[in-house]
């Protein structure tokens, strides 16, 4: 029957895509990235209506839709809210290089904020010991190597005890 043969084949078309991309961080994310790069300090932004502190900072509260204007200095520790264990390489969008599995990738709520930052857990950590609710600490690149993007965060390191 005409039209049947094409269903038996599924040709692959090899394509290599190279899409370098840059976007302007904007006023709020720029403050966050520059403070992290230059001082190793994390800042969130607080909503004047509901009091939520967002990280990375956004101009408008995602809940109330009002302009955020109050900066809040945060700690460099927090709580692991969720994670997944990766068993396949994951290409880092900022470096283009794969992280070799297995490793854990999670969402951390830094002390003093209400939203989460998604990032790697220390790849040297024992995966069996990683638990939701555990305390973690941010580990940044050495100051002289920081470039002012989220890759300056190397990973979240589990805190013993
Ligand atoms: Zn709000």
Image (cartoon, rainbow, N blue to C red):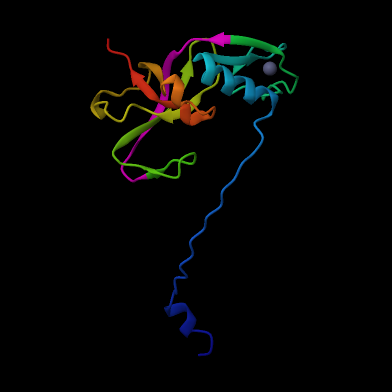
Q: Please tell me which residue is depicted at 63% across the width and 20% down the height of the picture.
A: 31
Highlighted magenta segment, given as a residue range? 73-89
Q: Residue furthest bottom?
A: 1
Q: Please tell me which residue is depicted at 34% across the width and 20% down the height of the picture.
A: 157
Q: Residue 123: where, in percent of width, then height?
A: 30, 30
Q: In which of the image's four quarters is ligand 1 placed?
A: top right
Q: Give the main secondary structure of the magenta stretch.
A: strand
Residue 156 found in image quarter: top left
Q: Residue 27: where, in percent of width, then height?
A: 69, 24
| For residue 112, above or below residue 11 | above
Q: Please tell me which residue is depicted at 43% across the width and 78% down the height of the picture.
A: 9
Does 110 sit left or right of 134 as displayed?
right
The answer to whether residue 75 is visible is yes
Does 49 sit left or right of 142 as displayed?
right
Residue 105 found in image quarter: top left
Q: Residue furthest front?
A: 144
* Pick the front one: 62 or 46: 46
Q: Residue 12: where, in percent of width, then height?
A: 44, 71
Q: Residue 80: where, in percent of width, then height?
A: 40, 21
* Pick the front one: 32 or 121: 32
How many numbered discs sit on the rendered protein?
Answer: 0
Report the quarter where the C terminus lies.
top left
| For residue 34, above or below residue 24 | above
The question of residue 47 being in magenta is answered with: no
The answer to whether residue 55 is visible is no
| For residue 23, above or below residue 27 | below
Residue 49 found in image quarter: top right
Q: Residue furthest right?
A: 66
């Amino acid at each position: 029957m005409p039209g049947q043969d094409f269903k038996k084949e599924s040709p692959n078309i090899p394509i290599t895509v190279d899409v370098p991309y840059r976007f302007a961080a904007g006023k709020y994310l720029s403050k966050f990235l520059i403070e992290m790069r230059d001082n190793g300090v994390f800042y969130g932004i607080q909503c004047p209506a509901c009091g939520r502190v967002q990280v990375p900072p956004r101009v408008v509260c995602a809940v109330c839709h009002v302009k955020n204007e109050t900066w809040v200095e945060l700690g460099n520790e927090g709580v692991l809210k969720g994670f997944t264990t990766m068993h396949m390489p994951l290409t880092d969008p900022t470096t283009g290089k794969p992280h070799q599995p297995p490793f854990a990738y999670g969402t951390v709520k830094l002390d003093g904020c209400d939203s989460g930052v998604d990032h790697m857990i220390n790849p040297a950590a024992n995966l069996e010991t990683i638990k939701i609710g555990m305390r973690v600490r941010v580990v940044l690149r050495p100051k002289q190597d920081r470039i002012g993007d989220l890759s300056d965060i190397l990973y979240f390191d589990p805190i013993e005890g």
